Image (spheres, rainbow, N blue to C red):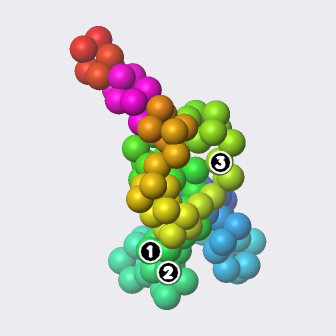
Amino acid sequence: MSQTMKPITAANKLGIYLPAAPEEFRNSPITREALDELRADPPAWLVELRKNGPFPRDVVAAKLGISRSGLARAGVADAMTADEIGGLLTDPPSWLVDERETHRKVLSEREKG
């Protein structure tokens, strides 16, 4: 019998925002074999989500170069598209500039510690 995982776990492993995935993915346990198959030969919906989003909070934070806490402090939605992220990177608001600096300092302190 194959081991299964919850859809949220599979979505996290794939780096996608679960509510944007197709209903059949969101509502069914995923086997490890199915997850490996999605990674090896991603269907069109997965390719699209990975390219344009919406992306989950941790992916948004990484793309913006800030922490998930920084997103929360800024009141950013749970998910953002590639266009929304691109807009922030093109013309960064003051909160993004501040959070990037904070994130750099935290990472620098961790490296020293």
Question: Does residue 88 lie above or below 73 as drawn?
Answer: below
The numbered dot on residue 76 is 3
- Tell me the tag on residue 48: 2
Task: State whether the magenta stretch is mostly helix, strand or loop.
Answer: helix
Residue at x-position 67% and y-position 53%? 78
Identify the residue at image location x=54%, y=37%: 95
- Graded by Cα atoms within 10 Å as few (under 14), some (14 to 19) or many (20 or more), the crowding at tag 2 reads few
Magenta stretch containing residue 102, yes or no? yes
2 and 1 marks in contact (CB < 8 Å): yes
Question: Which of pointers 3 and 1 indicates the residue nearer the eye?
Answer: 3
In terms of secondary structure, where does tag 2 sit? Answer: helix
Nearest to N terminus: mark 2 or mark 3: 2
> Magenta residues, as a range?
100-107
Q: What residue type is labelled 3?
A: Val
Please name the residue that numbered disc 1 is placed on: 51
Q: Identify the element where label 3 is drawn.
A: loop
